[in-house]
Amino acid sequence: MLIFRLPDGNKMEIEASQTTAADIAKAISPRLLKAAICAKVDGQLVDLDRVLVQGGDFEVITSNSEEALEVIRHSASHIMAQAIKRLYPEAKFAIGPATQDGFYYDIDLPEKLGENDLKAIEAEMQKIVAEDLPFERRELPKKSALAYFASRGDQYKTEIIEDLEGNVSLYKQGEFEDLCRGPHLPSTGKLKAFKLLSLAGAYWRGDSKRPMLQRIYGTAFADKESLKKHLELLEEAAKRDHRKLGKELDLYSVRDEGPGFPFFHPKGMVLRNTLEDFWRKIHQKAGYMEIKTPIILNEQLWRNSGHWDKYRENMYFTVIDDTNYAVKPMNCPGAMLLFQRQLISYRDLPLRYGELGLVHRHELSGTLHGLMRVRCFTQDDAHIFMTPEQIESEIIGVIELIDYVYSDVFGFEYHVELSTKPENSLGSAEIWETATNALKGALTRKGLSYKINVGDGAFYGPKIDFHLKDCLGRTWQCGTIQLDFLIPERFNLSYIAEDGQKHTPVVVHRVVFGSIERFIAILTEHFAGAFPTWLAPVQVQIIPVSEAHLEAAKKLKAEFEENSIRAYVDNRNEKLGYKIRAAQLEKVPYMIVLGDKEVENNTLALRSRTLGDLGTVKVSDFIKDIVSEITSLSRESAFKALKKN
RNA sequence: GCCGACGUAGCUCAGCAGGUAGAGCAACGCAUUCGUAAUGCGUGGGCCACCGGUUCAAUUCCGGUCGUCGGCUCCA
């Protein structure tokens, strides 16, 4: 007798014989069985046709849940593989998992697939769906599975099985059988909505030394409506793309003449300078002193620091008067030299040197991506020199600074990762352990959850990374806190401690924005180009109703500028509606219409890009309120109360 | 760097079985002087990414280079 607890608290008792998950679902309600994708027994997803041998919590997974989506997508990837096998019998398959919003399969195929081939594969998939083939599961001992896949020449599958323990499961639909943990849909006919999206290359096991496979990305949903919605969402997301908005709003661009070396236009520069002013303000308050170190320094320095050994591939070099120099890929050696210049007492520590430092790194051409990944960028860097006792409180201070900027000022959601010792690293295992534990300790004290990235640290120390999302949900590393016991030693840094002896300081390398460029890209996508007023390149667009009001408009602009409000007069010979539309498209926070009425009464007709027409406001009131919106770094309009219903 | 797709006016994009190019928007000029998301008419603007090959003839076909996009690897 097996006992199952259902989600509503009821219990169901079943004879332990040939009862399947589907039988239980049917017993609850035949309609439930019809909607079922798979079942969950004691937290484990199982196929509907699985014979149950143990009781426990029982739940039917229907098409609306997150878990169902994963099963649907995983099944879609198998159906895609089957279609490919039918069209290209020589195809060999690697891995084909479900992802965050779709699925992919990596395939080894002699012929190169193009976009048109996706249509043919999709059509074949439709046929397989129409055939409504049941997914059938079987288990084989590891040895037999190895022999089976070896006999088919599936070297990728055998490599995967090598790493598995015990029995392995296989799933078969029609003539196609694949290695898989499952579970799957009951049959191919249950796949209601899918689409193949793109084609890409992917190295087997993510190793650039191993064969490049062809990867097909697709997505699948429980119903056609959800699929349509998702595709529309992708289209909407594309409109937020910072490369598109950067061009449209005339903020920045990357030109063919300088791949990976971005240009900032006048308006982008306003945004950037505003961001940097903000940065200076908060760092001054947090006890940082600003420095600036050279972009080009003697190659010998980079040999000392370890960059020559560990980072040379990413560096640019040059020769000056027959001497070798390097263009800096990081700011740390320069900061070390500044620390070195004088005798430091423990009373001076922690010493926080901040630097908006322009670094150059040779990134692979295929990885360049607008402002997100470039070959030269400005890190909002800082190096904190301190005693070992100060580590935790300093790291906590940086975490708090980053959280203030991300959460309070910009309203970003972020996640944290801790990266540990890489293979290509300097220093002993003990030093790395001490440093890693210090970072873990600070994260725990702040109550932050984090993911561990094994072997992903910098060559000189472990790091905490802060990741932000772009318009498509791809995450980018922005803030980072890196603990370093090594470079101070290599540079022979010391301070005089209480005992009168020289001691080596510990250094934290850290950035808040990460790079100004990447951060601006994230900001652009996050706000879809509609920056908060304090950041907006143009804060107020003044729109004279006709040429007669141009003089008044210019006077108003001067008055705004005296109050540090960035204003622009649209003096084109166009109608009011045209200029309103233009300002809306440029996402200017406030539009001001000036006509006879306003000029006469020293008022202005106010319009907000989000709230629409807000009616008439006294000039002095407008200035007072917008200035308060700007200085408070608000993300909300100060004129919300004026909105008419 | 690797795999695939792509590169036509400032922008978004048409076009071409091979006969040296078009639209909308923008810009400029004229008229209009206008009240909350596009006034009308007119004008200028292109080494069709670059280099080479095939051809009587190449923006179009082929090869290479550079760049862009989507991924992989790598990273702020």
Image (tube, coloured by chain):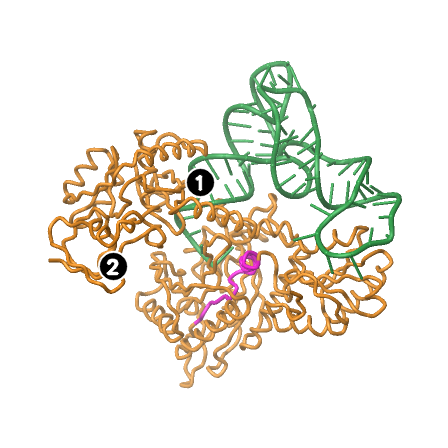
Chain letter, green in picture: B
Write down the chain letter for disc 1: A
- Say what secondary structure mark 1 lies in: strand
The reply to whether residue A122 is visible in this rendering is yes
Residue closer to the observer: A43 or A105: A43
Locate the C terminus of chain A by quadrant: bottom right
Q: Is residue A482 left or right of residue A327?
A: left
- Say what secondary structure mark 2 lies in: loop
The image quadrant that residue A3 belongs to is bottom left
- Do circles 2 and 1 both sit on a common chain? yes
Measured in 3D between alpha carbons, the distance from the residue under mark 2 to the one under mark 1, in whole angstroms, is: 34 Å
Residue neighbourhood size for the residue with mark 2, other residues' Cα within 10 Å, grouped as few (<14), some (14–19), many (≥20): few
Residue closer to the observer: B25 or A134: A134
Q: Amino acid at mark 2?
A: Gly
Magenta residues (range): A507-527
Decide which of tag 2 and tag 1 comes sooner along the chain.
Answer: 2
State the hue of chain A: orange
The reply to whether residue A296 is visible in this rendering is no
Q: Position of residue A69 (x, y in %)?
A: 35, 50
Q: Amino acid at mark 1?
A: Ser
Write down the chain letter for disc 2: A
Q: What residue is disc 2 on?
A: A43
Q: Residue at x 40, y 44 (%)?
A: A219
Q: Position of residue A447 (x, y in %)?
A: 38, 73
Q: What residue is disc 1 on?
A: A198
Residue A520 painted magenta: yes
Residue neighbourhood size for the residue with mark 1, other residues' Cα within 10 Å, grouped as few (<14), some (14–19), many (≥20): few
The image quadrant that residue A7 belongs to is bottom left
